[in-house]
Image (cartoon, rainbow, N blue to C red):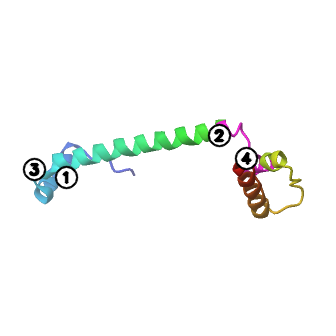
């Protein structure tokens, strides 16, 4: 059986909350809870937007595929290389070409 509080139970719970927290603190707590919920949703929306922009800039490619493309641009054959080694070599070659 599911517990479904009736009006009397709700009034008793509200009375207990008023006794524990006081009539002055309850509205402040509700306000803080509402603000934190709004901040959470705002942050969630920003994180989703950043991830979407990053995906669009990568043209739907995974980070490894983007690294393979960068390697081909600088003249490295990425076949059979470890990702970490490839990243180091590509970064080094890109920094050399930026300095020139």
- The image quadrant that residue 85 belongs to is bottom right
Q: What residue did someone put label 4 on?
A: 62
Q: Is residue 87 left or right of residue 81?
A: left
Circle on res. 61:
none
Are the residues at dot 3 and dot 2 in contact (C-beta closer than 8 Å)?
A: no
How far is disc 3 from disc 1 in space, using C-alphas? 17 Å
**Viewer-nearest of labels 3 and 4?**
4
Are the residues at dot 3 and dot 4 in contact (C-beta closer than 8 Å)?
A: no
Residue name at image x 71 percent, y 38 percent:
60
Q: Is residue 27 left or right of residue 1?
A: left
Residue name at image x 41 percent, y 40 percent:
42
Q: What residue did someone put label 1 on?
A: 13
Q: Was residue 73 drawn as part of the magenta stretch in this picture?
A: no
Crowd tier of the residue under label 3, counting other residues whose Cα lies within 10 Å: few below 14, some 14–19, many 20 or above: few
65 relative to 21, above or below: above
Upstream in the sequence, badge 1 or badge 2?
1
Crowd tier of the residue under label 2, counting other residues whose Cα lies within 10 Å: few below 14, some 14–19, many 20 or above: some
Upstream in the sequence, badge 3 or badge 4?
3
Are the residues at dot 3 and dot 1 in contact (C-beta closer than 8 Å)?
A: no
Are the residues at dot 2 and dot 4 in contact (C-beta closer than 8 Å)?
A: no
Upstream in the sequence, badge 2 or badge 4?
2
Upstream in the sequence, badge 3 or badge 1?
1
Circle on res. 55:
2
How far is disc 4 from disc 1 in space, using C-alphas? 52 Å
Residue name at image x 86 percent, y 49 percent:
75
Q: What residue did someone put label 3 on?
A: 24
33 relative to 53, above or below: below
Look at the image and give the residue range highlighted in magenta: 57-68
Q: Nearer the viewer, residue 39 or 11?
A: 39
């Amino acid at each position: 059986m599911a517990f479904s509080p009736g009006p009397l139970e709700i009034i008793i719970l509200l009375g207990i909350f008023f006794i524990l927290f006081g009539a002055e603190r309850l509205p402040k707590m509700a306000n803080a809870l509402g603000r934190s919920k709004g901040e959470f949703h705002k942050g969630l929306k920003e994180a989703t937007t950043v991830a979407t922009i990053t995906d669009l800039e990568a043209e739907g490619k995974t980070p490894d595929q983007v690294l393979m493309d960068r390697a081909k641009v600088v003249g490295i054959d990425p076949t059979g290389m470890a990702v970490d080694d490839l990243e180091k070599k590509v970064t080094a070659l890109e920094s050399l070409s930026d300095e020139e």
